[in-house]
Amino acid sequence: MSRSLVPTIPPAASRPGEAISPAAARSSTRHENLNLGFAIETGAVGANLDLFAEGRRLQARMIQSDQRHFLFDSLPDDAFARSACMAVARNGDEVFGTVLAHPDADGALLVRTLIVNPAYAGLRMGSALASAVILDAFVRGVSFASVTCAVRVLRDGGLNKPSAKSLDRIGFATEPGIHKARLAGTLRDRHLVPTAEVDEFGYFVRYVRLRGVRAEVVDRSVAMLAEWRDIPIPLDRLLAE
C-alpha cells in the first residue's frame, strides 16, 4: 500500500500560482508493491539530493549500456534550474528505474529520461514511474495543461516501443509528425552520435512527441499506481528463485 493518497485537487498551499510551502517542498512520497518487494519514491530534485543522486547513478550506468541510443542525459544544473520532480524505483538497495518531470516552455509538463533496467521488463514499471512523477508534480502545484514526452525514432524507423507503450497506458497519444533534435556533442548527447543521422547542419536524431490531457493523465496515473501496487510476482520469476 502507498503511504499517501493522491488528492483530487492540489492542496491549497500548493495550487498553481501559489508558493509551495517548505514542508511540501521537503516531503517525498513512497509507493510500495509488497508482492514484488519494490518501492517507488518521488520528490523534488532540489529538496531530495540523495534521491537525485540515486537516479543520476542509474542514468550513468544505462548510458554505458546497449540502451544508450534511446536516452538523452539530464544534467544536474538543468534539473535544478527547471525545478524538476523525480521518481526512482527500488528493489531493496538496488535502484532499477528513474524518471524526471518539469514544466516545459509550451505550458506542458515534460516527462523525460524514463529509464527501467531491462531485467525488470514486464512489470509495468515504466507506467508506474511516469504515473508517480506526474502525480508528484500535480500535488506540488506545478501548473500544466497537458503532459508530454519525446520518444526517439531510430534511423531504420524503429521506435522506443517500451516507453511509448508505458505512456500509452496512462493516456498519452502520439502526435503527428517526426521532429529533429540537433546534437551538440556535449555530455548530454555525445553518446547518441554513433547512431545519429547527418545533414548539412550536422548530427541530429529524430523523435516523435507524445501528449496527454492533464485531467485524463492524472486520473489514469492514480488508477495505474493502484493497479501496480497489486501486481503479483510473475510465475516464471517465482520459479527462478
Image (cartoon, rainbow, N blue to C red):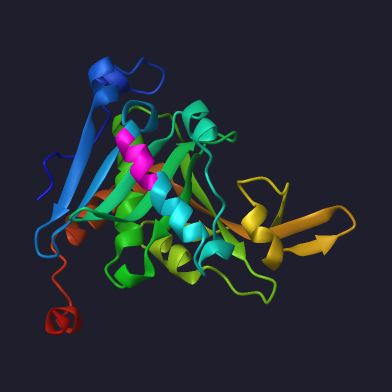
* Residue 200, image x, y percentages: 90, 57
Q: Image point 15% across, 40% down: which residue?
A: 5
Above/below status of 179 relative to 237: above
Q: Image point 40% across, 48% down: which residue?
A: 57
- The magenta segment is 50-55
Q: Nearer the viewer, residue 200 or 231?
A: 200
Q: Report the number of numbered marks.
A: 0
Can residue 21 be seen here? The reply is yes
Residue 154 quadrant = bottom right
Q: Image point 54% across, 57% down: which residue?
A: 71
Q: Nearer the viewer, residue 19 or 156?
A: 156
Above/below status of 241 relative to 196: below
Can residue 176 be seen here? The reply is no
Q: Main secondary structure of the magenta part?
A: helix
Q: Image point 18% across, 79% down: which residue?
A: 237
Q: Nearer the viewer, residue 20 or 12?
A: 20
**On-image quarter of the C terminus:** bottom left
* Residue 147, image x, y percentages: 46, 45
